[in-house]
Image: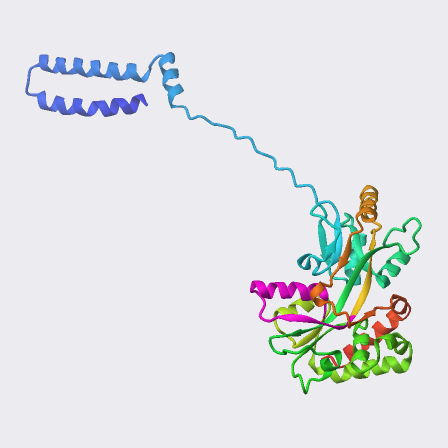
Amino acid sequence: MLTGLLLFQCLPLNMHAHATTSGSSHGTSNSVEKFFSHIGQSVTSVFSTPEASAHAHKHSKARHVTKRRTVVKPAAPPAPGWGVPEGTVAANALVGSDSTIRLIEWDGQRPTLDVGVHAARADWATVLLDGSQLADACQKGWVRPLEGNTTCGIQGGQSTLALAWDRSRLPSAPSWKDFWDVARHPGRRGLRLGARTTLEIALLADGIDARDIYTALSTRAGVDRAFHKLDLLRPYVVWWKTPDDAARIMEQSSALMTSAPMTEISSVSAKVKAGPAASLFVAQPDVVLRTALYWAIPANTPNEVAKKTLERINTASPHLDDTPDSATDPNGTILPVNEAFWTKYGDQLEQRFQDWYGSNQP
């Protein structure tokens, strides 16, 4: 650093010497003295005292502030909720519940139930099942046995399957017989992809009285008659698997008529009033199929949660009531879905239905 400084200061010396070579030696001496005097000042400023150097460094030093990292703890998983059929929340169909109960809608499919009751962390404190699902789950140990109860379930209301139609395209209420009359009422039809309820509807459309449906389905001739009726309608059917699928058919006006859970019919009708859906589907209350539901406690529900949930069910009696007063017809017919029949014949009828459905698929 000093060398560089000396070189820089020598430049004016050389120039000055060149300018005074013609002058006296005294002038030259004065110039040299001035030069070294200037150099001495520069050297002094470079080799300053430690105190001064430290003082200057203190003011120029950059400050490094260490920031503390805030560790965000992961949120605790939500407590297990109550499993209810799809459409229940929008239809406000669970009576006797309150805002402290977290409702979890599920699609009613056996694989979904299987996953739910075997999850490492329980999502359901309790779940609504139909009679056939309950009997199967109880036998397999998927749900807890209840003291003084041989069915593993507590009554939890009912779900209703009705004929819904697009009132913007068909002003008068159709019957199940009209459901099959595509010549008189052209358009697609929506049906559940499965034997349960679909075979009953086929026989209702074929003129069998609601009281005789299960007597007919208990015979080979009655089952053949139901599948023959389905053969006639098959080209016009839009199939749905879950309640949400049925709701989508109505929201998108994919069919003129469809079978659908009452919760979804109510939900779609409410959306129409609010604007999102394109048409207004309403229920035909003439003949509806009603399924009893039961609260069951999954085997993977923690003991303390199971205990509190059972106390709440027994105290408040929460239950599904999906039929609004406006959809009730005092002269209408209710066909209770026969759980004993479906427990006995369900597997073989579902297998035949799947074979029938797959026989003409590409």
284 or 329, nearer to the observer: 329
Image quadrant in which the N terminus is located: top left
* Coloration mode: rainbow
Residue 316 picture location, percent across and down = 79, 48
Q: Is residue 244 visible?
A: no
- Whether 346 is drawn above or below 300: the answer is below
Question: Could you tell whether 246 is left or right of 140 in the image?
Answer: left
Residue 215 within the segment the image draws in magenta: no
Question: Could you tell whether 231 is left or right of 347 in the image?
Answer: left
Residue 93 picture location, percent across and down = 72, 58
Residue 31 picture location, percent across and down = 14, 16
Residue drawn at 73 percent across, 63 percent down: 323
- Whether 124 is drawn above or below 281: the answer is above
185 or 122, nearer to the observer: 185
Kindly give the residue lying farthest to the front in the view shown. 330
Residue 3 picture location, percent across and down = 30, 23
Total numbered badges shown on the rendered structure: 0
Residue drawn at 82 percent across, 62 percent down: 292
- Whether 122 is drawn above or below 337: the answer is above
- Image quadrant of residue 270? bottom right
Image quadrant in which the C terminus is located: bottom right
Kindly give the residue lying farthest to the bottom in the view shown. 183
Residue 287 within the segment the image draws in magenta: yes
Q: Is residue 13 visible?
A: yes
Magenta-highlighted residues: 260-288
- Image quadrant of residue 85? bottom right
- Image quadrant of residue 75? top right
301 or 196, nearer to the observer: 196
